[in-house]
Image: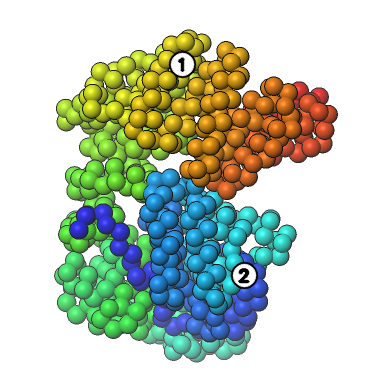
Amino acid sequence: MPVSELTLIRSKLLVPSPAGLLHRPRVCQSIERGLKCKLTLVSAPAGYGKTSALVDFAQHSSVPVCWYTADERDRDLGMFVEYLVGAIAECFPGFGERTRGALGSLSGDLARDPTGVVAELVNEMLEVGSSFVVVVDNYDAVDGAFGIRPFVHRLLEVLPDNCHVMLDGRVLPDVPVARLVASRQLVGLTAQDLRFSPQEIRDLLQLSQVEVTETQAEAIAANSEGWITGVLLLAGVMRDEARATLLDEERATAETYNYLAGEVLNRQPPDVQHFLRTSAVLREMSSRLCREVLQIGGARALLAEVERRNLFVTRFGRGGAATYRYHNLFRDFLHEQLRQRDSARYSDLHLRAAKRFERGNDVEEAVYHYLAAEAYPGATALMERVAVEWFTRGRVETLLRWAQELPGEIRTEAPRLSLYHSKVLTDRYDYEGARQALAHAEAGFADRGDTARLAKVHIQRATLASFEGRYEDTIAEAGVALEMLGQDEVAERAQTQRLIGRAHVGLGRLAEGVAQLRDALAVFRQVSSPYDVVNLLQDLTLAFTSQGRFDEAATCLNEALAIGRRLGSPAQLAGVLNNLGWLHYVRGEYRQALALYEEGLAAARRGGDLRGQANISEGMASIYRDVGACQRAESFYSAAWQIAWESRPGLAILVLAARADMY
């Protein structure tokens, strides 16, 4: 089995079983009322009981609840979709076969064009035939990740009536709140809604065998500000002492968390204290992992004891197959305790865990533990092994995180990772970061004497120079790459020729540029790469329009449009339509230009292509400006500026300049 083969962690798809869960009819009813809408948001700081509220709802819901606990490992869109489908399949076996098929066919292009996968997912949701809920717990672990935003926006736009989505997190997520509120398709719960009332505090403390009076409960509610984690910490302090007065005197807030957690920890038996600190090395625990990795005997009994004592642990599943996770705040506290008390043991446990997960082909978990142990050779070896495959599959968020977590002096030990890190940063307009990543890649490949991959470094450096308008540097870097590339590396040589051709066009050497671009186009036609053919046709268009050869430019763009429509990639199609619309605009053919722009804007929105939306909106605004429809022009200029400011600030300045021409 390949080391990077995808295996879903099933415990993330099970409704958790938190210890000492209190049923809260008031909160459940608030959640239930939102089922008529598309989306429920539960947003509150850590420790307010967001997950517990949704678990309580799931346990009492009249409709099936599909559960997905997200974490930072799911920030790649493909992984996020796999877990989303897996969650629904837990309730409806067989669900998601077509969605997974669409996912596999797109791989690295998914983040730019999620439309096809959304369509398959929605169609399969409709085929379920009955109502159901999808909960994404801890959504802020993936919120803001590249690709997830347009996917979720599109999914919410076309979500079928039989599905309701619930997201919880510490902050308000990046979803189209204004549009959903305007259409009455969103309800929200905040910290204010989740705060425990005095009676709920009494009921909860009774589950921990702590009795308080009504007056004391009111004092606790005031002192804890409804922050239930603080109440539970106080209950842990109180469990073995009859000092109920502490509960109405001590302030239980986030600022006092470490003190109170320390009090709870110190009141446990020595064997439980040792187990808590040791087991916190693992992000997810099972009796088997505790035995194999941590060498703890009697782990199953200790896990049960931790659960019995309500020590901020959540169980997934039952019996010997059960897995457990500590509440994030409590795990962070225990983990830091171990590091401070015994740093050598902390590193040794993480190293043992890394080797265990590597043997089990869990690359991501192994890398996490190698990094925690500062065992960088083990971490970089795994990163290098999967970097190319994961970049191709679109798992770029994971690659970015790894690159950022490596110390600067270690990054030359992972040159493949650094090369793909540079590619991603270039695509996201972080040119300075891309240059630094390329320097690490070049040094690493040079140390290995890897000429073939050094050529790729020079190709990427030429690409970066082209994006920045440094065309002489583009030609120089591409020339070095051509000298290093073998004659059999046909596609790479053609891409390099394309860079040289674009640079000549940028420098005004149009004849040389067109010759290079035509040579590259011929190669891509020969190797049947339609995506690259479309790109080359658009490059030639730029050269032809610079020479006033509009008919030849139109011929190229019309061929590109026909191919683009067959390929069905919204972002690329939007680019072609934008260019063809502009060509009609400069020829004074406003009606045709506007029709093409409108189609292009729709494609850019489908693909979540912010740059395309900004470019096309600016083009439409210019048409309305020229025909004197200033109000409509102002609307499109405003939209273009707002979108450009989010995605490409340099373009926003050009939009402002075009807008100024109206006045």
Residue in the image at 22% along x and 24% along y: 486
Q: Is residue 451 visible?
A: yes
Residue at 32%, 47% in the rendered image: 390
CA–CA distance in space, label 2 to label 1: 53 Å
Task: Say which element carries label 2.
Answer: loop
- Tell me: residue 659, above or below residue 318: above
The image quadrant of residue 299 is bottom left
The quadrant in which residue 431 appears is: top left
Q: Secondary structure at mark 1?
A: helix
Figure quadrant of residue 208 = bottom left
Amino acid type, callout 1: Val
Tell me the tag on residue 549.
none
Front position in the image: 481 or 124: 124
Give residue 161's mark.
2
Q: Residue at x 76, y 23 (%)?
A: 661
Q: Nearer the viewer, residue 256 or 42?
A: 42
Which image quadrant: the N terminus? bottom left
Q: Which residue is located at x 62 percent, y 39 percent?
A: 600
Give the percent coordinates (x, y) of residue 138: 47, 63
Q: Position of residue 626 (x, y in %)?
A: 78, 26
First of labels 2, 1 by sequence position: 2
Residue receiving disc 1: 514
Which quadrant holds the C terminus? top right
479 or 429: which is nearer to us?
Answer: 479
348 on left or right of 570: left
The answer to whether residue 3 is left or right of residue 57 is left
